[in-house]
Image (cartoon, rainbow, N blue to C red):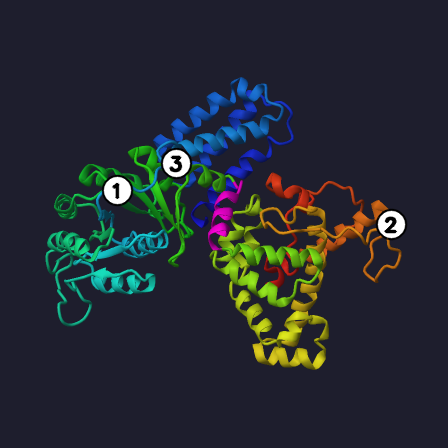
């Protein structure tokens, strides 16, 4: 996540010099702790949290836990991961408290600009997707156009909005001149919404309340009045991950003022230092329940302290990636695609269908960011243009069904027609077709590597064709019979497909800086990341 990118880089650098050492001295550990302390302070983590964190890490690192480990450097990283998970709220993470008798009442609190209104729509969308019937309540009658914004967000999310009062408008009508003035009674709106929800059989009520530019007694009194009027099951404190050290002070003020039950981190996609957000759970003792990391309705996820710690340490978040894929992917379609890859009959139609499924998961940047070791490719990630996916779709949709099934029939005149129809150059069409052909060969080879079990996690048959092993009649793209030469050819092919120049030299030379794959995928991909399919991270899309 962008808010923690600087912290990730600094922590990764702190561990680098440990990797080459078989045994760690006290000076080595102290140097690493010093770098970790600087990284956390630079990221705006609370000083008290940093002190206790580094003290616990040092105590464990100097103990038998590291000195007796086979790989002391990895053990230090594990200790940091454990302690980072602890300050993020290990053991206190929990699901939402739902009422035994609906409706469940959720009240949002926080400063103005923290993203409460947008978050109300995201939470409503998430609850609706989980099978609930949420209702959004516009109780922010102070900020100009807050009610209108909630209505727009609710319409996008497909969630109804209860808004009997229009609040402050920016022009005409109910506009007010005094800053901070409120029109209507937000407490009455909140109280009436509960009865309205019971009548209309909504099982969850999300109340969007007003904020202030800073903590003051007027703000807290209004929040307390709404809380006392509706007796919410959850009071969620929405904190902007980019506000720095003030996040801790604000969290403490709201905890004392309204006694919130959980925290939501917003704007984790921002480029400011987000370390102060790490302090909130530790300082208040209240769990972080959700994280919001973008403007889209789907840029919202349940917060897991252990997974966030893994992301911060550039260890990836494969579990979240798998959960998203299981939720969005069509299992039957994926199984058919795996079988076609194994058979070598995977066409552009199939690729388009898979591309559309991937798009359901969210932005490519966020998906790639969940892969272990991707911090070292951050520049490529930042340069990745999401519009490349649209261009790729346009090129494929400009082809006839026959051309998608068999790209080999696409000659020069057809390429010119496809380029004209999709609004790109002929060279872009040529590049896509060339990369697709190379990638299809690579996917078939990987499916054969995976064996009869198919691609891990795809559930389809793979590499099931055994019978053609001993045939002498080979086609033009054959492999060498010399194992050493064959591996060199495969290495060169992988380098071409990933958009990197072939390095030459021995095929058995150690590959530097290759992120480790999850254990279940190592056999299929030979211990390396899947090929980027040409054009850097853009792959087929570039």
Residue 407, percent from left and from top: 69, 71
In this rendering, is residue 87 above or below 475? above
- Position of 473 with respect to 149 (left or right) is right
Residues rendered magenta in the picture? 314-328
Q: Do the residues labelled 1 and 2 touch (CB within 8 Å)?
A: no
Give the structural element (helix, strand or loop) at label 3: loop
First along the sequence among labels 1 and 3: 3
* Quadrant in which the C terminus appears: bottom right
Residue 542 in view, yes or no: no
Give the Cα separation between the discs numbered 3 and 2: 54 Å
- Position of 360 with respect to 92 (left or right) is right
Residue 147, percent from left and from top: 21, 62
Q: Main secondary structure of the magenta part?
A: helix
Residue 293, percent from left and from top: 40, 52
Question: Residue drawn at (29%, 51%), measured in percent from left and top?
Answer: 114
* Residue for badge 1: 250
Residue 147 in view, yes or no: yes
Q: Are marks 1 and 3 in contact (CB under 8 Å)?
A: no
Give the Cα separation between the discs numbered 1 and 2: 68 Å
- Labels 3, 2: front one: 2
Q: Which of 466 and 21 is in front in this view?
A: 466
* Residue for badge 3: 88
Give the structural element (helix, strand or loop) at label 2: loop
- Position of 504 with respect to 64 (left or right) is right
* Residue for badge 2: 481
Residue 318 included in the magenta stretch of the image: yes
């Amino acid at each position: 996540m962008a808010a923690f990118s600087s912290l990730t880089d600094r922590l990764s650098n702190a561990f680098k010099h440990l990797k080459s050492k078989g045994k760690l001295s006290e000076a080595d550990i102290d140097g690493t702790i010093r770098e970790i302390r600087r990284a956390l302070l630079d990221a705006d983590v609370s000083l008290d949290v940093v002190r206790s964190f580094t003290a616990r890490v040092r105590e464990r690192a100097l103990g038998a836990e590291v000195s007796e480990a086979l790989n002391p450097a990895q053990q230090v990283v594990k200790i940091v991961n454990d302690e980072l998970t602890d300050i993020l709220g290990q053991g206190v993470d929990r699901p939402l408290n739902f009422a035994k008798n609906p409706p469940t009442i959720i009240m949002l609190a926080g400063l103005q600009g923290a993203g409460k209104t947008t978050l109300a729509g995201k939470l409503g969308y998430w609850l609706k997707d989980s099978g609930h019937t949420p209702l959004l309540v516009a109780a922010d009658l102070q900020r100009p156009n807050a009610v209108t914004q909630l209505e727009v967000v609710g319409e996008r999310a497909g969630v109804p909005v209860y808004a009997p009062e229009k609040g402050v408008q920016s022009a005409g009508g109910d506009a007010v001149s005094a800053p901070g003035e409120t029109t209507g009674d937000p407490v009455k709106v909140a109280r009436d919404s509960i009865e309205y929800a019971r009548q209309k059989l909504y099982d969850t009520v999300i109340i969007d309340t007003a904020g202030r530019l800073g903590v003051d007694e007027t703000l807290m009194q209004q929040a307390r009045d709404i809380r006392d009027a509706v007796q919410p099951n959850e009071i969620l404190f929405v904190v902007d991950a980019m506000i720095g050290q003030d996040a801790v002070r604000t969290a403490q003020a709201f905890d004392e003022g309204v006694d919130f039950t959980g925290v939501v981190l917003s704007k984790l996609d921002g480029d400011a230092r987000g370390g102060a957000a790490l302090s909130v759970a530790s300082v208040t003792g209240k769990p972080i329940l959700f994280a919001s990391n973008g403007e889209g309705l789907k840029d919202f996820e349940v917060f897991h302290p252990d997974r966030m710690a893994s992301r911060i340490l550039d260890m990836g978040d494969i579990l979240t990636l798998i959960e998203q894929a299981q939720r969005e992917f069509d299992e039957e379609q994926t199984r058919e695609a795996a079988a076609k890859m194994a058979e070598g009959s995977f066409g552009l139609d199939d690729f388009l269908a898979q591309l559309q499924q991937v798009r359901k998961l969210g932005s490519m940047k966020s998906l790639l960011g969940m892969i272990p070791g991707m911090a070292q490719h951050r520049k490529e990630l930042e340069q990745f243009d999401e519009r490349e996916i649209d261009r790729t779709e346009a090129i494929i949709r400009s082809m006839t069904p026959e051309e998608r099934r068999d790209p080999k029939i696409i000659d020069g005149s057809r390429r010119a027609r496809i380029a004209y129809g999709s609004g790109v150059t002929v060279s872009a069409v040529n590049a896509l077709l060339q990369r697709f052909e190379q990638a299809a060969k690579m996917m078939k080879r990987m499916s054969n590597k995976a064996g009869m079990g198919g691609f891990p996690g795809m559930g389809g048959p793979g590499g099931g064709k055994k019978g053609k092993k001993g045939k002498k009649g080979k086609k033009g793209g054959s492999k060498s019979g010399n194992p050493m030469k064959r591996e060199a050819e495969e290495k060169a092919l992988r380098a071409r497909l990933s958009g990197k120049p072939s390095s030459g030299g021995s095929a058995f030379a150690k590959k530097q800086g290759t992120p480790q794959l999850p254990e279940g995928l190592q056999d299929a991909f030979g211990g390396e990341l899947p090929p980027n399919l040409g054009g850097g991270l853009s792959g087929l899309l570039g």
